[in-house]
Structures are given as structure tokens and as C-alpha cells.
Image (cartoon, rainbow, N blue to C red):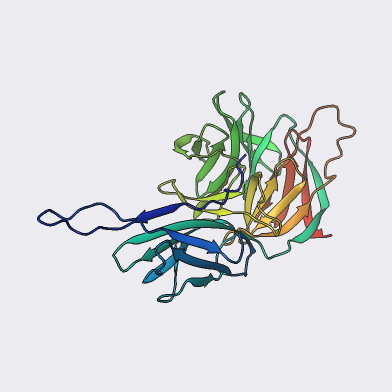
Amino acid sequence: MKHPILMAVAIVLAGCTGQPAKKQPSTKTEHAKLKIELTSGSSLISGQSIALKINTDSNPLPDSARAIVDGRSFWFGKGEADIEIPTTDLSVGQKTIRVEGWLGSGAIAEGRTSVCIKSDIEPEKLTYKVVKQLPHNQQYYTQGLEFDGGTLYEGTGLEGMSAVYRIDFEKQNIITSISLPNNYFGEGITIMGDKLYQLTWRSCIGFIYNKHTLNKLGEFSYSTEGWGLTNNGKELIMSDGTENIHFIDTTSLQVLRTIQVYDTEGPVTELNELEYVDGLIYANIYCTDNIVAIDPATGKVLKIIDMRNLLDASKLTQRVDVLNGIAYQKTTGHWFVTGKLWPKMFQVEFVKK
């Protein structure tokens, strides 16, 4: 598991010396140290301003300076040592702040620091109401669950048991399926257009299938573990077991951007199976009974759904594992939830506590 980035300050210095007589200009650098002080502290709530103070070892302030965070520049006034950076429009998470300063000698001074921005929104607390219980194959180590009209797709895990199943949901019959090679541990799945995408856990390889036949069309790679997968109609959305959620271009299959998921306490890690519904990302939190709803623009947790006691395992003779698998059927507006090795799937409604 990954941990939030440790806060550190690294200083990089650069400049130019004069030119010795009768020689070519020297490339030797003169060093001017840019110091950064976080006067607002290193941990903030979204909406609070980041307050910075800068100075150099050589006493004069830079003629001009800017702070860069999330690719945006915030300029200091000429000769000013202090700046306030609003966080209202920034996503939450651990932020690196780079400050550049230009000195009268032509030297450039650079400094870095970091700050943690937590969510300012207290998540809405929800629970569930069971509408209907349905059978679920208890051999399925559920990793991905998704509807496409009246067809249910389920991706399963464990090495030697990983597969994708295309199921007639009304008849509860398997239409077709495909098994992964024994060295792959299947993870999340999602459907875009006529393609089904599937992650694997630690192999850093994803598979692309024809959603109708489950014939393999191609592969893609990623640099993290693969956990949950969904899409917003334009991009794949992937979790990796940390607080990070990655948005992936479906043409290049490269990561376009990454958000960090935070609530009012800090990072929310072990984000697992995902579902994108009405502009929000829903995620199972691994080894818990919670599902969270996430703002994809900011990374803030907006809802926490308590799913405790959904499955009564007291009378079961076979082992069951954790809650995992959440699917929304657009044609009916129904939610369905299950778990790894569960004998049942549940149609549920989310209600206020």
C-alpha cells in the first residue's frame, strides 16, 4: 500500500558568473538559495489559503517570483516576500509547490515545499434497504460487476480462477465466458461502446475484449497495481488500492490525470471496485462494509454508505470474503451489490441513516 507523500523541501539553485578577460563566457553557476516558509502550516482544509513567505541567502528578494501548484502559476508582487494561494479551485490531496524567483544578477532561484489539503465537506451518511435477494455463484471471487442493458458482466479474481462472464440477468444464464491464463489475477472490468476492459492485479496488464463475444482484441499496460475500473463515457477510471484514481485515455491508453481521494480526516485508501453514476464515482473500500461516493473533479468524498450486515454469514457452511461488487442498471435505475464468494446478490436502495 502506498502512503501519502512525505512533506519535504528541496532547494535547487542556478545563476551565471561574469566573463573572464579574453575568454569565452563561463558557464559556471552562482548559487542563490531560495527559502520557503509555509506560514499557514503544512495541513489545510479546502477553502483555506496557502500562505507562503520567501527569502534568499543574499538578502535581496527576487525581482519577480511565482509559485506553481497543480500546473497553475500564482505571482508575487514586485519586491514582495508573501503570497496567499486560494485552494477553493484546487483538488484535495498532497500538493507540491514549486517557487521560482528571478534575481537582478540573472540567476534563477528555485525552491519546493508541500502541503496537504483535506476536504471541507462532511460526507452524507447513508445506509441501505434490501429490495430483492438474488442468487450469486459462490465460486466467483468478484472483482468487477457491470450492467449493459439486461446483460450482467462479472469479472472474477484469483490465479487459476480469473474469468469474465457474460450473463443473461433475467434468466440467470451464462451466455459466454473467457478464462484468463493461470498467471493472471483478474480485477475490475468496465464497458465502453462495444469493448470490455479488464484489469489484472500485479501484472500491470489490462485486456480489451469484444463485449458480445468476449474475443480478446488487445492489451494495455499501467505502472501501478490494478484494482477497480469504471468509465465516464469518455475515459477509463481506475483505482490502484491507494487513495489515487487515474483517468485513462481510451485511444492512447495512457494516464491523463490523477486525483487523490480525501475526506475531512485525510486520504481514503484501498479504493477497490468502482462504478460511475450520475457524475460521481462510487467505490468499495476494501476490507470494510463501506461504499464511498467521490467527486471526480476534486477528489472529495461526498457520501459514505454503510453496508454492514448485508449478508448474514452465520448459517453459511462455505467461506465468504469481503463486500466487493457494485453495479447500477441504467435501464431500471436499480443498484446491485455482492461480495467475493458470496452466495447472494442484493438489489438495494441507498437511504439516509
Q: For the C terminus, give its image quadrant.
A: bottom right
The picture places residue 110, in percent across and down from the top left corner, at 40, 58
Q: Image height check: is 226 above or below 257?
A: above
> Which residue occupies the foreground of this view, 172 or 98?
98
Residue 30, by quadrant, is bottom left
> Which residue occupies the foreground of this view, 97 or 132?
97
Residue 225, by quadrant, is top right
> Which residue occupies the foreground of this view, 280 or 1?
1
Q: Image height check: is 75 above or below 298?
A: below
Q: Image height check: is 135 above or below 54?
A: above
Residue sitting at the far right:
315
Q: Which residue is drawn at 67% across and 50% down?
A: 268
- Left or right, 210 with respect to 318, comes to left
Observer able to see residue 211: no
> Which residue occupies the foreground of this view, 84 or 336?
84
The picture places residue 36, in percent across and down from the top left corner, at 50, 61
